[in-house]
Amino acid sequence: MKKLKLFPKTFLYTLALMVFVVVIAHIFIYRLAPQNAMSITLTDPIANTVETIPVDTNEEKIVMQAIQGALPLSLVCSLIISIICSFLFSKAIVTPIERISASTEQMMKLDRDAACDIHSKDEIGFLAQNVNDLYSNLLSTIEHLEQEKDRVSEMERAKVDFLRAASHELKTPITALNATLENMILGVGKYQDYAAYLPECKEIVEQLSRMIHEILETSKLNGVTEQPKTVDLSKLLNELCEPYQLIAAAHNISFSVDLPDTFLVTLPINSFSKAVSNILSNAIAYTGAGKTVTVFMNGRSLVIENECVPIASNDIPRLFEPFYRPDFSRDRESGGNGLGLYFVDTLLTSMNISYSFAPMKSPPGMCFTINL
C-alpha cells in the first residue's frame, strides 16, 4: 500500500473529523426535532403576564418540512466549510514541517549554508532551532575530524620521512664499520695494524650510539603530553644558559644574557627547556671564536642571536627537516646529526608556540625568535 504524504494525510484526517461532527449534528437535528412539542410564548406587557400557546399539528408539520428541506443545503454548506477549514488547518500545520524537511535534505548533502527558517516560538520553532544547532555541531565535528585526519596523515608522513632519513644516516657509518672490520679480519694491507683501526671502529660505534639515542629521543616527542605550568621565564632561562656560558667561555665566545627580573609564562616546562637547549647548543656550535651569542627578551618574544655566517634563505626551511645539514656543515664532526632544529620544530609545534629563524645583517649572523 502506498503511503500518503503528510499534507494529504493531515487534510484527510481533519476533514474526516469535521465531516463526522457535521453529519452527527444534522442527524441529531433530524431525529430530535419531531419529538419536541412546538409552542409559541406570548408576553402581555400591560398585564405583565406570559402565556404559552401550543402550536397546531399542521403548523408543526410545516416547520418540520422546512427544517427537513433546509438540511441538505445546510449539510452541503457545512461540508464545503469543513473542506476549506481542513485545507487551511493542514496547510498551517504541514508547511513549517515541509520547510524543515527541505532544509534537512540540504543538510544531508552537507551544504554549509543550509538552515531551517524559524517563523514561530512554538514546538515547531523549537524543533527547527534544535535541527540548526545539531547541524552546526555536526559541521564543527566534521571539520575537527578533518583537521585531525590531516594532522595524523601529516604525522604519518613525517614518521615515514624520518625513518627513511634515519635509515640513510645509519647506513653510512654501519657500512664503513663493516668494511673496516672485514678488512681487519682478512688482514688486507694497512688494516693489519689493529692498534690504528680499532680506535677508529670504536669511534664509529660511539657515533652510531649517539645517533640511535637521538633517534629514540625523537620518536618520543609526539607521544608525550605535558601539562603547562606557570613559571618565571627569567629564572628558567638563566638556569638553561649557565652551562652554555661555560662552554662559550671555553671556546672564547662571548655569551650575553639580558632578561627582566621577572617574566611569568604558562607553558610545558620540560618541552620548552629542551627546545631552548637545542637552540642554544646550535648557536654555540656555529659561532666562531671571538664572536657573540646574545639572549634577550623583546616584548613577549624570546630572542637568541649568534654571530656566524648567515644561512641562505632557501636553506632555512630545510634546516628543520631531520638529518639535514647545510653544505658547509655536512661533516658530522662539525655539523652534528642534523636533528637539533628538527627537535625544536617538533617541540614548539606541539606546544602551539610560533617561532621564526632568519639571518641578520648587522652583525652578520642568525636570529631565532620564539613568540610567547
Image: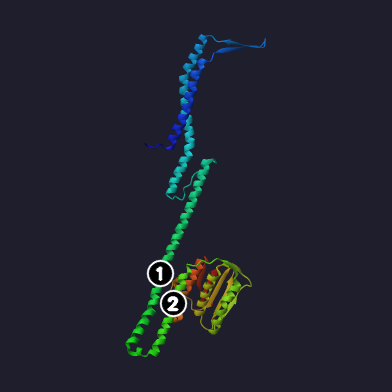
Q: Is residue 305 left or right of residue 13?
A: right
Q: Position of residue 264 (x, y in %)?
A: 61, 68
* Residue to which mark 2 is pinned: 211
Quarter of the view holding residue 228: bottom right
Q: Mark 1 points at which residue?
A: 161
Q: Callout 1: 10 Å neighbours few (<14), some, many (20+)? A: some
Q: Where is residue 308 in the image (x, y as percent from the top left)?
A: 50, 79
Image quarter (top left, top right, bottom left or bottom right) of the C terminus: bottom right
Residue in the foreground of this view, choosing between 99 and 17 = 17
- Determine the residue positioned at 45% across, 34% down: 10
Q: Distance between the residues labelled 2 and 1?
A: 16 Å
Q: Position of residue 170 (x, y in %)?
A: 39, 76
Residue 372 sits above or below residue 240 on the image: above
- When the figure is inspected, residue 353 is found, relative to residue 117, above or below; the finding is below
Amino acid type at mark 2: Met
Q: Which of marks 2 and 1 is nearer the N terminus?
A: 1
Q: In this view, does 15 lie to the left or right of 178?
A: right
Confirm or deny contact between disc 2 and disc 1 (CB under 8 A).
no
Q: State which quadrant residue 269 falls in.
A: bottom right
> Quick one: SS at disc 2?
helix
- Asked if residue 79 can be seen in this view, the reply is yes
Residue placed at 44% from the left, 37% from the top? Answer: 6
Q: What element carries label 1?
A: helix
- Mark drawn on residue 96: none
Three-letter code, disc 1 = Asp
The percent position of residue 281, horizontal first and vertical second, equals 51, 77
Q: Is residue 361 visible?
A: no
